[in-house]
Amino acid sequence: MATEPELPDAGPATTRWVVRVLVLGAFAATVWWFGPRAVAVLAARFDLAAANGPLVALDRVGFAAQPEWLDRELLLAVSASLSPLLQGEMPLHDEAAARQLCAALGATPWVRSVALDRLVPDRLQLQVDLRRPVLAVRSAEGDPLCLVDGEGTTLPWVETPLPQTFLYHEGGAPTMAFEPGRPAQDGRVRAAAAVAVEWRDQLAPLVDGCPALLEIDATNLGERWLRGPSYPEIRVKLRRADGGSVIFAYDRPVDSVLPRVPTATKATVLTNILAAHPGLAGLVAGDLRLARRWRDFLQPREATLRDPLGPWSELHPRGG
């Protein structure tokens, strides 16, 4: 009578692998046959666990840091914009609620981006990248319109000591429509904002005791108002030490395809002017573009200097 061959005895290692295969096979079969429902059940259980986690009062959410430029008035404006969204409570580990909160905060005009961190055991911390205003925009009549950041994005109006730009009639429309959080449509505003950043970050640090920048005048943008070397596309108004102001020819726009005077040259000219006229005393106008002849274009002009744009044909007396 034939006998069946004996199978080798399965050891502990083989048994473990068999168990793993059976478990994984059962899981795979479950996902195969009941996939959508199984995933939904698992997700619901995780969401239930998150929803039952510790609650965090949103009005006590901390901020990672406060920018140094955020003065009192701007801080109040930003807080007024964000505080309505920081009400009630939120489960610490609720991902859906966290995404919703970040999306709502990111949709406000002041916020460029936002991230949320969880701090053990029961705290939330926001990392908010705020848009930094660099310019205040007013209508031709001086009515306040909005602030703008360095990228030309409009922001709600706040009374601040920022430099201003006026939408003078000579340069186009005397006012503009805007939606906070959206780019400014007027090219004068965008050009002035770029100059404000250039002045703050590149020119002012090179000038000891640099006067405050009061206004950026982009009325002649594209030479739409006047043509000629004495009427640049951009002019700037600086504060005199006595509280008055001095208007200076500045340059072409920052993004101009035509050559521009280097920022360091304009800083050197301003330094020389301040050395000759401390605090810009007695001046009403000048030109920052002229590395050598800057003195000739200061107003009022020194008695010993002739108007460089005057009638040169009369330099010598006629006859003889």
Image (tube, helix red, strand yellow):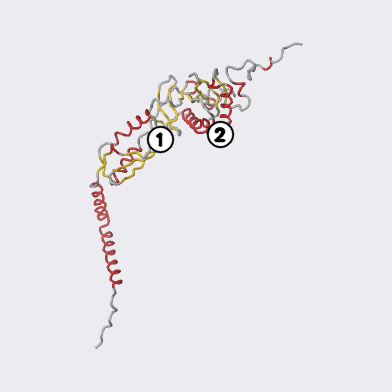
Which x, y percent locates residue 13?
30, 71
Residue 109 numbered tag: none
Is residue 79 found left or right of 242 in the rendered image? left
Q: Residue at x 25, y 56 (%)?
A: 38
Name which residue type carries label 1.
Pro
Which x, y percent locates residue 4?
26, 83
Mark 1, residue position? 67
Residues at badges 2 and 1 in contact (C-beta under 8 Å)?
A: no
Is disc 2 surrounded by few (<14), some (14 to 19) or many (20+) residues within 10 Å?
A: few
Of the image marks 2 and 1, the number of the one nearer the N terminus: 1
Mark 2 or 1, which is nearer the eye? 1
Which x, y percent locates residue 178?
40, 29
Element under label 2?
Answer: loop
Is residue 95 found left or right of 192 in the rendered image? left
In-front residue for pair 37/299? 299
- Residue that sits furthest to the top in the current view: 319
* Rendered-image quadrant of the N terminus: bottom left
Q: CA distance from mark 2 to mark 1?
A: 34 Å
Name which residue type carries label 2.
Val
Element under label 1?
Answer: loop
The answer to which image quadrant residue 275 occupies is top right
Which x, y percent locates residue 315?
69, 15
Residue 257 numbered tag: 2
Q: Residue at x 25, y 43 (%)?
A: 55
- Residue that sits furthest to the right in the current view: 320
Is disc 1 surrounded by few (<14), some (14 to 19) or many (20+) residues within 10 Å?
A: few
